[in-house]
Every structure is written in structure tokens, then in C-alpha cells.
Image (spheres, rainbow, N blue to C red):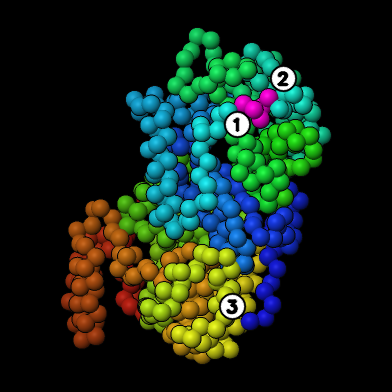
Amino acid sequence: MSTAKPLTLYNSLTREAAPFRPIDPDMVRLYSCGPTVYSAAHLGNLRAYVFTDTLRRTLNWKGYATTHVVNITDVGHLTSDADAGDDKMELAAQAAGETAWEVAARYTALFKADLKALNVLDPSIWSVATHHIQDMIAFARAIEKHGAAYEIAGGLYFDTSKVPDYGFLARAAPEGPEVGRIGEVQGKRQPHDFAIWRRSPPDERRQMEWQSPWGPGAPGWHLECSVMSMKYLGRRFDIHTGGIDHREIHHVNEIAQNQAFTCSADTGANWWMHNNFLVDRTGKMSKSKGGVATLGALVARGVHPLAYRLLCLSAHYRSELEFSLDAVSAALTRLKRLVGTVAKAAPADAAIDGWAAEQRFSRGAALDVFRDQSECELPPAAADHVDRFDAALADDLNTPVALTVLDAMLADRRLDARAKRRLLASFDAALGLDLLRTARADLSLRPETASLDAGAVEALLGNRQAARAAKDFAAADAARDRLGAAGVEIMDGDTVRWEWRPALTD
């Protein structure tokens, strides 16, 4: 293999791509904004975690060790994303007839299950907001002491005029209405000043409130990430990730807090990285749209979770990704064909799979693919595929190109099955499609309304294939009709095996 390409990443702070250089060459420190656990995460939310997981896997693939922190927001996020409205956790608890703590526990567990289904690696640290209330109070007191906060009837507010470059991340003028949220709160000095600590109304008792120097209440949403990122990663760390909507508001205010706390121009992270929206034909996907907005709803329609991961990888993380049933159905088809190709071209090999299971997530293990391994010597032709795959990842995580390299490698007749299996282990350490372990039968999920199980579908497909070979087209059509009535769509073609998928409908 030739010299590995330097990793280039796009930085939202500078609006340009640049070679990535970690603060500590021995450990990349990474923080990701986690979910507000008042309901199930929608597919647009989950795209952010597929992106961050791909980033982390790429860093590992390129030889960097990582410390990754993901927060769980279980308090402080208001329904308006501003300084008005109800706390999302309190509102969800009232609607469910449960405590806010019960709601948080239920949806935290569901979120983690969704990530596991998508083959997203667990972070190094799960950081729960309500476990850090005293840290947040101390952080807020420091900002107040530094003269960047003031107290009003509603609580403690951040004075955005104290930050010279406030709004720079969003490329918005500090005095303009487009930066931050304009909340109608009496006593605010500037419309875009935001709550650091929200005092509870005197006539209202809330489930989630704590005593503070500014009265009983709860932290502001933006405070949480400043506190937890610095607590675990230091005042300056490498990368902060989130959805592109955070770039305009949440991360702008987070940076302002970081600068006021440290009395410096440091933004906290050197790199701020944002994935673009998942959109449908009516615009940005959100929880309120219902339908197939959650992973669970998608699975109920017969779509394997890894098909959604593949759909995300098929577009660059900084591009909008259009979601439709047709698009996710096509991703499922692509995944089934890929798994079928792997089974034929690079079948299971105990020695290689054992090496992969041991090495795949350790620092630089994927690039160690060319180290001498007596059980599998790689031919020179493998180097070209590794170089091209490395170049794709190094180009700001260009996963669409990386997928084409994977396809080309599996089709390369110069490589034997063992070489392909070993390269597959390396490539999938970055892509996370779990191709070493996923069998075609695993992808044969069906809608709950289907009247046939996967085994019956395969049997009918075999009968239909035999009937077609015998030119008994009446029998073949009868098998097709039986499958169609059960909600199964057949895809004929020159594939490794006869393919089918659940018939998805709006």
C-alpha cells in the first residue's frame, strides 16, 4: 500500500475543508450532541448518529484512538427551542401520565436500541444532563462572575453583547434577528440573549427543578453541552458534531458560553461538523410527521435497519438526503445484493473472521490489513483497492465513493475469496454495515401484515425459478401472484440469487 492519504474534514467554523490534525496525536476527543429523550428519535435524528459513527470509525481506520462523548438531554429543552414554552420532558410526562424520569428512561433505552440496530458503536461515555446539575450551576456562576450573564425575573441570562464574534458559526450578524431565537422574555437586554438558568414560576412546582443561586429551576438547553464536553474532554478538544440545525442556534450559543467561561476566543472544539437534513417531499423530516418517521415504523414495514444505514452512506453527510419508501426500498435491495455477493465471492473464513472480530475497532486495525498474517497473504492487486478506499474516506468521509470501491473489490477476479474477505473486514470496519455477520435471511424481514414467513417466500421463489426454467409460465405466474398477495415484491435480474423485498406502500 502506498502512503495513506491525510484525513481532510470540512469545518463549519471556517466553512472549508482542511487536513485534520488532532490536539493530542495519541487521542482524538470527540463530542456529539445527543437526543432529547421525550419521544422516539425520528429518522432525521438518527442520520446524525450514522454520520458521527462513520466519522469515529474513519478516525479509527486512519489510525487514531478516540474518546467519544454523547450526551442525553433529559431536561432543559423547551418546546420552542428558545426561552418560552414548556420543557419537552415535563410536557411528555404529563401526556403519558408518567414521571419525567420514567419518560426519560424509556426513550433513552429506545434510542440506544435504535443505535444498536444501526450498528452504531457505543460512545466512550454516555453523559446524562441531570447527572451534571451541580457542574452546570458552577459553570453558570463562573460566566456570571466574568460579567457575561445577568439575572432577571425569569432566571440567569447570557449577555450576547459580551462576545465580540457572537453568531460567527452561523455567519449571522450579532445584531441581526436571524441569529439565535428571539424569545419574548421581559427584562432581556438583547432579543437573542438566552437562558443559562430558568427560574421556576413561583406558583408552579415542576418535576425537574433544582435549587440554585438564582432560585429553584432548571438549566438552559445550551448550558448542558458546554459543561459536559469540557468536563470530559477539556477546554479545547478536537471535534464537535451535530445536525445542521444546531449550527444556527444551539452551537452558536454553546460557543458563546465556552468563550465567556474561559475568557478567551476558544470555541471549545477545533472542528465543528454538521450533517445535513433528511428530507421528504414536504421538507425536513420531523417527529410530528408520523408515518415512517421512526426506525421502528420502518422495520415494521419490512425494512432491515442496516438498509437505512446504507441509505445514509449512499449520500455525502453534508448533502441533503431525500427519504421516500422507494429510496429505502432500493437501499434494502442494494443491501440484499451486497450480502449475496459477499456470500458468493468472499464466504465466511474462521481465521479471517476471528482476526476481524479482535481487531476491527482497535486503533488503526483496518490499515493493519497488510501486516504479515500467515493465514492470508494479500496479492498486489489488493493495494489499489485499499488506496482508493482510503482516499475516499480521507476526502471528508466520501462514503458514496467508498461504497463503489467496495463493490469493485468484491468483483475483482484478481483477488481470491480469502483476500476479498480480509479486505471486506477492513472496509466494513469503517462502513459499519456488519457484512461479515449479516446473512441474506437476516434481511428477509416482512411487514406484520404479510401472510408468509421468510422460509415460505424462499420456497415459492425456488418453485417460480424452476417453473420459469421449465417454461411453465402459468405456474411461475401463480407463484408470483401468491407472493404479491402476501406483500412480497419480486425483483428479477441477473443477480447472485433471486431477489425479493416487502412491497412498501404509503
How would you rate the neighbour count of disc 1 (Cα within 10 Å): few for under 14, some for 14-19, many for 20 or more? some
Q: Toward the viewer: 466 or 219?
A: 219
Q: Toward the viewer: 366 or 134?
A: 134
Q: Which residue is mark 2?
A: 150
What's the residue type where badge 2 is placed? Tyr
Cα distance in 3D space between marks 2 and 3:
56 Å
Question: Does label 3 or label 1 sit earlier along the sequence?
Answer: 1
Q: In terms of secondary structure, where does tag 1 sit?
A: helix
The answer to which image quadrant residue 337 occupies is bottom left
Any magenta on residue 138? yes
Classify residue 309 as left or right of residue 488. right
What's the mark number on residue 386?
A: 3
Classify residue 323 as left or right of residue 215. left
Q: Which residue is mark 1?
A: 135
How would you rate the neighbour count of disc 2 (Cα within 10 Å): few for under 14, some for 14-19, many for 20 or more? some
Q: Nearer the viewer, mark 1 or mark 2?
A: 1
Return the x and y of residue 38 as percentages of the image width and height.
44, 34
Magenta part of the chain: 136-141
Residue located 77% across and 26% down the image: 146
